[in-house]
Image (spheres, rainbow, N blue to C red):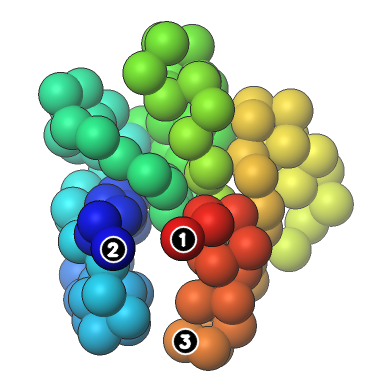
């Protein structure tokens, strides 16, 4: 099976490491980005199968990141999950409007995260 590559954008070092560890152990390749702009730059010439992004980040937030990636042709159909502490319905609506595929609340449960990933990212 070809390893799927997942891009994680989160300004929290510890959270990125936790997500990266969970994904790596499950057999995924991981690219880490510290904010939305960093993620956009890293996504440019990479094959990325899934994006997991925080909502609130400096420089460029998760919704901006999703909009930016969706506006190009490369990642127009790439599944994108928001992983955030933000449970506000308006924010979720904004995320969906921007093109978010799903919404996972922090603190996340590794098994739950992997279950959602398997749903949006068929092997």
Q: Please identify the quadrant where the N terminus is shown.
A: bottom left
| In the foreground, 93 or 76 | 76
Seen in the image, is 108 located left or right of residue 94?
Answer: left
Of marks 1 and 2, which one's residue comes earlier in the chain?
A: 2
Q: Which residue is mark 1?
A: 123
Q: Is residue 95 above or below residue 99?
A: below
Q: Which residue is mark 3?
A: 110
The Cα atoms of the two marked residues, 1 and 3, are separated by 18 Å
Residue 83 rendering spot, x and y as whole percentages: 52, 62
Seen in the image, is 40 located left or right of residue 62?
Answer: left
Residue 93 rendering spot, x and y as whole percentages: 80, 39
Q: Residue at x 61, y 68 (%)?
A: 116
What crowding class fits label 2: few (fewer than 14 Cα within 10 Å), some (14-19), or many (20 or more)?
few
Task: Kindly report which numbered mark, 3 or 2, lies closer to the viewer in this rendering.
Answer: 2
Q: Quadrant of residue 103?
A: bottom right
* CB under 8 Å between discs 1 and 2: yes
* Residue at disc 2, secondary structure: loop
The Cα atoms of the two marked residues, 3 and 2, are separated by 22 Å
| In the foreground, 16 or 120 | 120
Q: Is residue 47 above or below residue 87?
A: above
Q: Residue at x 59, y 83 (%)?
A: 112
Q: Which residue is mark 2?
A: 1
What crowding class fits label 1: few (fewer than 14 Cα within 10 Å), some (14-19), or many (20 or more)?
few
């Amino acid at each position: 099976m070809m390893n799927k590559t997942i891009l994680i954008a989160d300004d929290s070092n510890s959270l990125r490491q936790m997500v990266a560890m969970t994904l790596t152990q499950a057999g995924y390749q991981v690219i880490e980005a510290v904010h939305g702009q960093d993620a956009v730059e890293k996504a440019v010439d990479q094959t990325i199968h899934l994006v997991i992004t925080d909502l609130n980040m400096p420089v460029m937030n998760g919704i901006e990141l999703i909009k930016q990636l969706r506006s190009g042709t490369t990642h127009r159909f790439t599944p994108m999950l928001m992983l955030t502490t933000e449970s506000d319905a308006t924010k979720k609506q904004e995320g969906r409007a921007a093109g978010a595929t799903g919404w996972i609340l922090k603190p996340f449960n590794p098994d739950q995260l992997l279950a959602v990933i398997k749903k949006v990212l068929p092997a």
